Amino acid sequence: MDTILFLAAPITACLLLSGILGYFGNHILSRGVIFVDIAVAQVAALGTMIGILLGANEGSLFSSLFSLGFTLIIVSAFAISKFKHKEFSQEVIIGIIYCMALAAAMVMVDMVTGGSNFIQKTLTGAILWVTWKDNLILFIIFSVILLLHMFFLKKFIKISQGERDSFPLSELRLLELVFYITFGIVVVQSVKIGGIFMVFMYLIGPAAMTHFITENWRKRFFLSWIFGFLGSLIGLFVSFKYSFSNGPTIVCTLGLMLFFIALFSKNPNKHTAQIIE
């Protein structure tokens, strides 16, 4: 009981993160832009580092605004570039952004006090030390974003399934901007707590598991949440019991769950999904 009480706030954070990231993960996986999340997460970390370099404290409003600003610029540019540079694979652009953001962070690591520790934290996160105030902020932000997505849900699903030609270009641009800007906000908030590795696994791991089980979007959203939360619970208790690092343990747990489901799945993904009726 003492362990459960101590882990109550981290468990709640995992519940929130697995829900929102599982939702976005199904879209990202269907769109085939698998590494967009890790690129956005690295850009968010770079923005925070620049804010700290300019005198802001880590976790302050100023550093958070820097992180969010850099992220929104990148995701907006990515959404627009999909229309202007169709001859290039989206993964090429994503890879270049990730490498540049990582290289810039490595250049500045010695300029920032505690830079090495900051890099380590952005990779592995600090979910064990999340507070109830952090959870409340996450809940409010994620709820607003999910309500907005519910309004455009069928359109977002059509785009994720490749039915882009069914929309006028102006509407498609607007929808893509809304999707990627809200996605960027979610990643910025999630990286603060979970770190880059954990956010990436929350997005891709549970969503990939559901693609072996069902083609229905509604079921995929729900199962992604369940798988992500279950893996988080197991990872948290294992890391707490054996004094392992929390984020990497959760990542490894979700990875093992994915391999297990893929190995024993009798319904391989057909790369299609049904629109919610």
Image: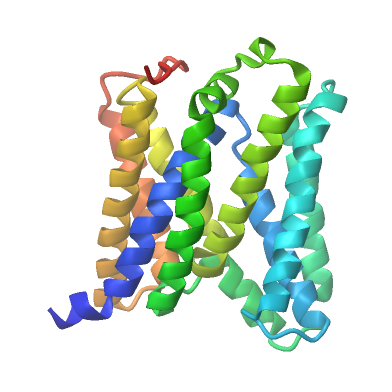
> Could you tell me which residue is drawn at 68 percent across and 32 percent down?
176
Type of colouring: rainbow
Between 148 and 93, the one nearer to me in the picture:
148
Q: Position of residue 224 (x, y in %)?
A: 35, 40
Depicted 165 relative to depicted 83: above or below: above
Residue 110 appears in the picture as rendered: no
Depicted 92 relative to depicted 2: above or below: above
Q: Position of residue 269 (x, y in %)?
A: 40, 20
Q: In this view, does 274 lie to the left or right of 3?
A: right
Between 192 and 244, the one nearer to me in the picture:
192
Q: In this view, does 130 lie to the left or right of 163?
A: left
Residue 166 appears in the picture as rendered: yes
Q: In this view, does 118 lie to the left or right of 256?
A: right
Q: Which residue lies furthest to the left in this view?
A: 1
Q: Quadrant of residue 188?
A: bottom right
Q: Which residue lies furthest to the right in this view?
A: 84
Between 6 and 256, the one nearer to me in the picture:
6
Q: In which quarter of the image is residue 250?
A: bottom left
Number of numbered discs visible in the structure rendering: 0
Between 188 and 177, the one nearer to me in the picture:
177
Q: In which quarter of the image is the C terminus?
A: top left
Q: In which quarter of the image is the N terminus?
A: bottom left
> Could you tell me which residue is drawn at 78 percent across and 49 percent down?
74
Depicted 234 relative to depicted 114: above or below: above
